[in-house]
Structures are given as structure tokens and as C-alpha cells.
Amino acid sequence: MKTPHIKTELPGPVARQMLARDAEYVSPSYPRDYPFVMSHGRGAEVWDVDGNRFLDFAAGIAVCSTGHSHPRVVAAVKAAADQFLHISSDYWHEGQIRLAEMMNALAPMNEPVMSFFTQSGTESVEGALKLARYVTGRPRFIGFLGGFHGRTMGSLSFTSSKYTQQKGFFPTMPGVTHVPYPNNYRPIFAGSDQGVAVLNYIENVLFASNVPASEVAAILIEPIQGEGGYVVPPDGFLKGLRALCDRHGILLIFDEVQSGVGRTGAMFAAQHWGVAPDIMCLAKGLGSGLPIGMVVAKKTIMSQWARGAHGNTYGGNPLCCAAAIATLELVSESYRQNAANVGAYFLDQLAGLAARHSVIGQVRGKGLMIGLEFVTDPVSRKPARALCDRLITRSYHNGLILLSCGVSTVRFMPPLMITRADVDEAIHILESSLVEELATPAALS
């Protein structure tokens, strides 16, 4: 097993100088935690500017799906750069057309699809919302508590994973009603199946007393909730949501920005339950690090958009399309299956870790989208927020890059090419860091 090579006290001297420069000239709004200043990366390994090596299980927030600087992705981008760097979406080019053809061939809706190209997840969500309103002529939407869909004003109106993302920006887009995301570990409604309870609430409470179903354009949901805690919905919920939408003529939008492109061991997370949306939002892992997103919709829906109804300047950038094509090829060839196989091994190892430490309340996830929720004790299930935050920082000091989600959950979203050896190293660092943290006087304060 490789061991992290931490040469300096973190942050090191070069990093400290750069952090001081950043503080003078870069917006303080970024939600940064520990002071990692990156120099370069290869695969699942990254190095900071002081020469310290880390294992990266955050992957740029699930973006570097094929690993840092995968040779095939880099070669594809270089080849595209030799041809031209930009042509606006007023015109055509091979990469954009080929990428749309590849997406159709992946059959995310089990029928022909069309694609609109964006630069980010939040722009993909904005495009999906506009499309839903345009096609249905309806003004309202339903979102889910705990969801994260972006920070621009339309997507922000759905984002509810932390109130800090909304604070200071009201009013956002009107017409959005939130309902609970079904979480059997932290139930809100009576009943053992929170999926059934949430569907009942929408159908028999919300539609009966507050929101006319006939005015709802779409329901927007993450098939596996990301920022809200890596929450996996109960089996049957997404199928029930699909049926509810069909009964009322409501479009179903799946935000697969974080869960898509092989992350969960399926090409798209919703495929675990055999449910197809009407519209799907993609970004993050699609470009292996280059900024690209897509709004993918059934052809019967997107073909209704009139010329000029929606557009952008950078959509379908040739370099980004080249990166996305190479990424989809790699994921289809082997990395999706690797995410399924290594992810199952990872879940087993984390289950063993949970058996050894009662502060781990739940291990959940699919493929390489895994959450580890920390609690003060297993009976009350009170979130151990401070422990989670300190563990992530201590893991950084021990050579492992992680991020949190939800209230007290560590999320694991490594590159899809990781090996079992990488998992073993990560578990070793994580458990060592947890033992160190639990030995401190304020461990569960």
C-alpha cells in the first residue's frame, strides 16, 4: 500500500503564501474548508504546491470521473485545440453532433432524445426548467428538501440543502413548492416506507389543499440526493413518482449532475430502478474536469422548442465536447463497471468500519457515490456535525481529500478508475483519523 507523503506542516510555506494572495483578490464567497492548494494530479493522486501527496476521494466534487489528467482525455482536448478553440452555437461542428449522437445511443429515456449543451450543472437545470415551462405552458414546480440544483436564481429556488445558499437572495423564482425527500433513516412522516408516505403527501395533501396539479409543469429531483446527504431513496419511490407525474401530465426532471455518467455503477443513477425521466440534467463528471453540461430530453419534448427559444454562447465548446466524448468512451468501456465492482467492495469495507465505531450511524450509496453518516449515538441518531467536520480536516492532514454533505455525512466520490488498493488506503487513513479524533476531549461536542 502506498502511504501519503506529507513533507511539511499543512499548509506548507508555498501554500501559505498563495492563500494570502488569494485572500486579497478572490471572492470570499467560495465555501472552502481546509487549505489544500493543488499543484498537479494523476489518476486518484494529487500533490499540493509544497510537494505533499494525497489520495483524492473528492475528485473535484465528482467531476474528475476518469481521474486527474487521463491521457486519453488530455490527448482528445489537445487534438481539438489544434483545430479551433471556439465556435458559437449559431453554427455546427463534428464534436457537438457526435456527442449528441452518443447520448442518444446511451438511451437514457428508452426512446430517441435530443440534447442542449451547457457549461455547468446549474445552467443545465435552468435549461430544463425553461423547457418544461415552454412545453407544458404551466407555471409551477415541485422540488425536494435537501436538494441541491445550483446557485443561479432559477436553480437556487429549488436548492435547499443548506439555508446559507438561499440567505440574502430572496425572492428567487416563484412557484416552487418543496416536499420532503424520502429518507427511511430520518423519517418525517409516519410509516416505515418514507417513499410511499411522500407520494401520499404530494397526491392527497399538497394537490388537494395547496398546489393545483394541473398547474405543475415538472417535478425536479435527484435520483440519489447529493449535497443533501447522499441519500438513496427507498425502492419503488421513483417508479411511484413517475406514475404520479403521468397521471397529472407533469414532466419528470432528473438532476443527474452528480449521480450520472457511471458514478453509481450505472450510466445514470435512475437506471438502478428502471425509471426514465422526461428531461435529464448532466454536468460534473461528463467532461472529466472540463466545464460542460447537457440538458437531455425526449425528442418529442425538445423538438417543440422554436428557433431562438433558448441558446448560449459557449454551449458545445469543441474542447469540452472532445473531453466528454473521451469520457463517455472510457466510462462505457470499463469505468462504469469498475465503479460498480470497486464500489461494492468499498461499501463492504465501510460496513466493517461502522461495525467497529458506533459513531457511524449509516453507510449508504451505490457504486462510487457513498455516504457515511456520523451520529453522537446510534439510538438517538443525533447528527455529529462537529465530529464530521473535524474528521474531514484531520483526514486532509493525514493525506486524504474528502468533502462532507448533509448535516454530518462524509461523502466519497473518487475517480471511477480507483482500485481496491486505493480503497484500502483510504479506509486506513480514515480509520486512523477517526481514532485520533475520538481521542480528543471534544470528540462528540
Image (tube, helix red, strand yellow):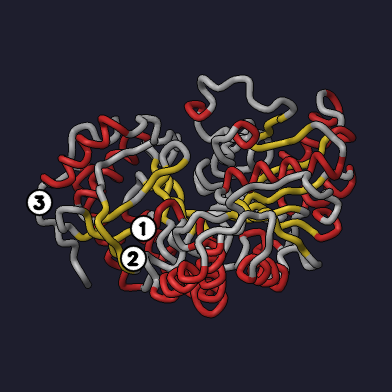
Question: Position of 54 compared to 297: left or right?
Answer: left
Separation of disc 1 and disc 3 at Cα?
Answer: 21 Å
Q: In the rendering, which numbered label is found on residue 44?
A: 2
User: Where is mark 1, residue-wise?
Assistant: 57
Assess whether mark 3 and mark 2 are in contact (beta carbons under 8 angstroms). Answer: no
Mark 3 residue type: Thr
Secondary structure found at label 2: loop
Q: In the rendering, which numbered label is found on residue 33?
A: none
Q: Position of residue 32 (x, y in %)?
A: 34, 38
Q: Residues within 10 Å of mark 2 (few under 14, many from 20)?
A: many
The one nearer the camera, 288 or 140, is 288
Assess whether mark 1 and mark 2 are in contact (beta carbons under 8 angstroms). Answer: yes
Identified at 80% across, 47% down, the residue is 251
Which label's residue is closer to the chain start, 2 or 3?
3
Residue 104 appears in the rendering: yes
Separation of disc 2 and disc 1 at Cα?
Answer: 7 Å
Q: Position of residue 116 (x, y in %)?
A: 69, 55
Identified at 59% across, 54% down, the residue is 293
Mark 1 residue type: Phe
Identified at 40% across, 30% down, the residue is 29
Identified at 64% across, 42% down, the residue is 182
Q: In the rendering, which numbered label is found on residue 8?
A: 3
Secondary structure found at label 1: loop
Mark 2 residue type: Ala
Camera-nearest label, 1 or 3: 3
Q: Position of residue 223 (x, y in %)?
A: 64, 52
Quadrant of the image for the C terminus? top left
Question: Position of 183 compared to 80: left or right?
Answer: right
